[in-house]
C-alpha cells in the first residue's frame, strides 16, 4: 500500500535568522513522499535566497497579507493528501511525520493528529514572564497549534480555511470550528516539536493576540448556541 503524500506549508516573513534550521528539520524527516511550500510574505531579508537554495522546496510569494492568508494560499497551492505546517523559527524531530501518518492510518475516524511540544528559550533572549507561564520550559505540552498538527485534506472541505480577518489566533479559531463540526482529534504521546521562544514571537508580543483569542471563542459560542435553537 502506497503511503499518503504530505504537504508541508511554511509561512514566513523576514525569517532568515532561523529559517535554515526549520527547513533542515523538514528535509531530515524519515518519511516520504512530501512536498515543502514556503509562502513568503514579501520578506526584505535573505528569506528568498535561503529558501531557493533548496531544490526540494517550492517558493511562493504570498499574494495577500497576514498569516491566515499565507496558510490559505499554501493549502490551495499544495497537492498532498495530508497537510502540515511549520513556523520558520521552530524545529521538528525526525519522526514527526512518520509517527503522525502512522497514527492516521490506524485511526481513519480521526481528522487530525497532534503530539507533544517542548519549548526552549533561544540563547541570549529574556524569558517573557509577562506573557508565558514560568514552568513552560520544564514540561512537555499537548497543545493544539499549527506547528504540531497533521490534517487530512478533506477536513478543510468541512471546516473551511483560516479566517483572514485574524492576524493571530487563527489556529484557535480553526480548531474551534473543527470541534463544532465534530472532527475527531488524535494525539501521539511523543515530543515531535521543539518550539522556540525568542524576542520576536508574534503571538507572545502582539497586543492584538488576546483580543483575537476572545473573538475566536465568542464565535464558537455563538455557533453552538445557534445549533441549539
Image (cartoon, helix red, strand yellow):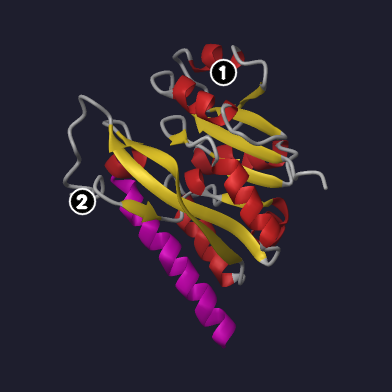
Label 1 crowd bin: few (<14), some (14–19), many (20+), radius 10 Å: many
Q: Residue at x 48, y 52 (%)?
A: 115
Residue 7 placement: quadrant: top right
Of helix, strand and loop, which mostly describes the magenta segment?
helix
Q: Is residue 63 magenta?
A: no
Instruction: Tell me where the magenta segment starts and ends, as one range.
Output: 206-229
Element type where label 1 sits in the image: helix
Front residue of 36/200: it is: 36
Q: Residue at x 49, y 74 (%)?
A: 222
Quarter of the image with the C terminus is bottom right
Residue 36 placement: quadrant: top right
Mark 1 and mark 2: Cα distance apart in space: 34 Å
Using the image, determine if residue 162 lies above or below residue 24: below
Disc nearer the start of the sequence (1/2): 1
Q: Position of residue 158 (x, y in %)?
A: 69, 62
In the picture of the structure, the residue carrying the numbered disc 2 is 135
Front residue of 220/65: it is: 220
Label 2 crowd bin: few (<14), some (14–19), many (20+), radius 10 Å: few
162 vs 139, left or right, is right
Judge depth for marks 1 and 2 and give the one in front: 2
Q: Is residue 218 magenta?
A: yes
Using the rendered image of the protein, determine whether residue 161 is visible from the camera's viewpoint. Answer: no
In the picture of the structure, the residue carrying the numbered disc 1 is 51
Using the image, determine if residue 41 lies above or below residue 149: above
Amino acid at each position: 500500500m502506497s503511503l499518503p503524500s504530505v504537504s508541508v506549508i511554511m509561512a514566513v516573513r523576514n525569517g532568515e535568522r532561523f529559517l535554515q534550521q526549520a527547513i533542515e528539520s523538514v528535509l531530515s524527516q524519515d518519511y516520504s513522499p512530501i512536498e515543502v511550500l514556503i509562502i513568503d510574505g514579501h520578506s526584505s531579508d535573505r528569506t528568498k535566497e535561503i529558501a531557493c537554495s533548496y531544490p526540494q522546496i517550492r517558493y511562493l510569494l504570498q499574494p495577500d497579507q497576514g498569516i491566515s492568508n499565507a496558510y490559505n494560499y499554501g493549502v490551495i497551492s499544495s497537492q498532498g493528501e495530508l497537510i502540515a505546517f511549520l513556523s520558520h523559527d521552530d524545529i521538528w524531530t525526525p519522526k514527526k511525520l512518520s509517527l503522525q501518518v502512522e497514527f492516521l492510518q490506524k485511526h481513519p475516524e480521526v481528522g487530525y493528529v497532534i503530539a507533544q511540544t517542548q519549548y526552549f528559550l533561544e540563547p541570549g533572549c529574556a524569558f517573557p514572564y509577562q506573557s508565558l507561564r514560568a514552568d513552560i520550559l520544564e514540561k512537555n505540552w499537548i497543545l493544539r497549534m499549527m506547528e504540531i498538527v497533521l490534517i487530512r485534506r478533506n477536513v478543510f472541505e468541512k471546516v473551511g480555511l483560516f479566517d483572514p480577518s485574524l492576524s493571530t489566533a487563527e489556529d484557535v479559531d480553526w480548531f474551534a470550528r473543527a470541534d463544532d463540526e465534530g472532527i475527531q482529534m488524535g494525539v501521539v504521546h511523543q515530543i515531535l516539536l521543539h518550539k522556540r521562544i525568542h524576542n520576536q514571537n508574534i503571538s507572545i508580543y502582539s497586543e492584538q493576540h488576546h483580543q483575537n483569542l476572545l473573538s475566536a471563542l465568542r464565535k464558537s459560542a455563538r455557533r453552538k448556541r445557534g445549533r441549539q435553537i
